[in-house]
């Protein structure tokens, strides 16, 4: 299969770059020879049927799969030109640079303020006035400040599902990542909350590189600049989102987009 990376001579250097990536859960191979480049300050969507490898690939980008027993990765993944799987690479620094937002909102059973401040405190990044200013800035960026500014001491668990997800985004933003990974960030939300998160994603790409896994093909079309289609552990096709949806190059992509399987 042809190399599916989308860089060309006029493109900026890739923010993240995967080359010949294979991944195994024990003896089961979950990803097969994946080559994929992610451009800076864009939203890249990963689509495909359940079990196709897209979430597995997403978790490789900040080495969350390291925590799984008997798992193994082959190939290379670079962040700003550095191999994140190289011996001695600082995994804690990687996870500060590459933040993660999960499918189900997962606020800590703490106050709204303490949720956003959590990463700053454990990493000893901010204290005092700087801490307060960073929490406020992160909540503003996540579009939540006006709704919670008078209730920062309230438990985060009192917020609605959509507010909790924006709080988790604010928590990720507070430690100043350069890449934000989102694994089905709206699948547990109602349509109104989904719309708010999608608009937020579009805003975030001004300052961050965003990679989102979604089962919702309409969502991929709305929010992403580029889309990658995974099937049975392989990256079948990656292209500009409009081109991929309107003129897919591969028959498998065409069949999936037209509902023939998945």
Image (tube, rainbow, N blue to C red):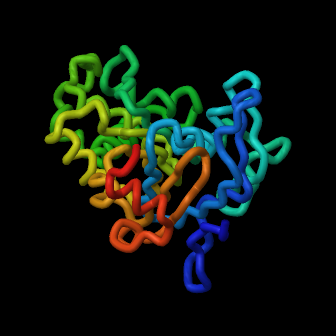
Determine whether 84 is above or below 222 in the image.
above
Residue for point 25% across, 26% down: 152
Q: Nearer the viewer, residue 101 or 93?
A: 101
Q: How many marks?
A: 0
The answer to whether residue 215 is visible is yes
Q: Residue furthest right?
A: 87
86 lies left or right of 257: right
Quadrant of the image occupied by residue 58: top right
Q: x, y percentage for residue 255?
A: 40, 58
Determine whether 49 is above or below 18 in the image.
above
Residue for point 33% across, 27% down: 113
Q: Residue furthest top?
A: 109
Quadrant of the image occupied by residue 44: bottom left
Q: Nearer the viewer, residue 173 or 73?
A: 73
* Quadrant in the picture for the C terminus: top left
* Quadrant in the picture for the N terminus: bottom right
Determine whether 250 is above or below 145 in the image.
below
Q: x, y percentage for residue 85?
A: 76, 45
46 lies left or right of 234: left
Q: x, y percentage for residue 49?
A: 44, 43
Q: Nearer the viewer, residue 257 or 136?
A: 257
The answer to whether residue 203 is visible is no
Residue for point 68% across, 25% down: 68
């Amino acid at each position: 299969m042809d190399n599916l990376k989308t860089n060309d001579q006029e493109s900026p250097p890739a923010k993240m770059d995967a080359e010949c990536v294979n991944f195994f859960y024990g003896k089961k191979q979950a990803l097969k020879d994946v080559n994929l480049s992610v451009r800076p300050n864009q939203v890249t969507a990963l689509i495909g049927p359940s079990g196709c490898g897209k979430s597995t690939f997403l978790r490789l980008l900040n080495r969350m799969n390291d925590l799984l027993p008997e798992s193994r990765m082959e190939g290379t993944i670079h962040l700003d030109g550095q191999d994140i799987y190289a011996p001695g690479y600082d995994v804690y620094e990687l996870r500060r640079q590459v933040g993660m937002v999960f499918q189900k909102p997962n606020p800590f059973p703490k106050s709204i303020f303490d949720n956003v401040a959590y990463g700053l405190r454990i990493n000893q990044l901010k204290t005092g006035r700087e801490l307060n200013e960073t929490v406020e800035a992160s909540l503003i960026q996540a579009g939540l400040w006006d709704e919670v500014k008078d209730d920062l001491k309230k438990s985060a668990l009192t917020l609605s599902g959509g507010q909790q997800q924006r709080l988790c985004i604010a928590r990720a933003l507070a430690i100043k990542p350069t890449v934000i990974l989102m694994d089905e960030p709206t699948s547990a939300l109602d349509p109104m909350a989904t719309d708010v998160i999608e608009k937020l994603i579009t805003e975030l790409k001004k300052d961050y590189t965003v990679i989102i896994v979604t089962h919702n093909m309409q969502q991929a079309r709305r929010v992403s600049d580029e889309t990658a289609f995974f099937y049975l552990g392989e990256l079948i096709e990656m292209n500009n989102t409009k081109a991929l949806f309107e003129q897919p190059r591969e028959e498998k992509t065409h069949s999936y987009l037209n509902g023939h399987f998945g």
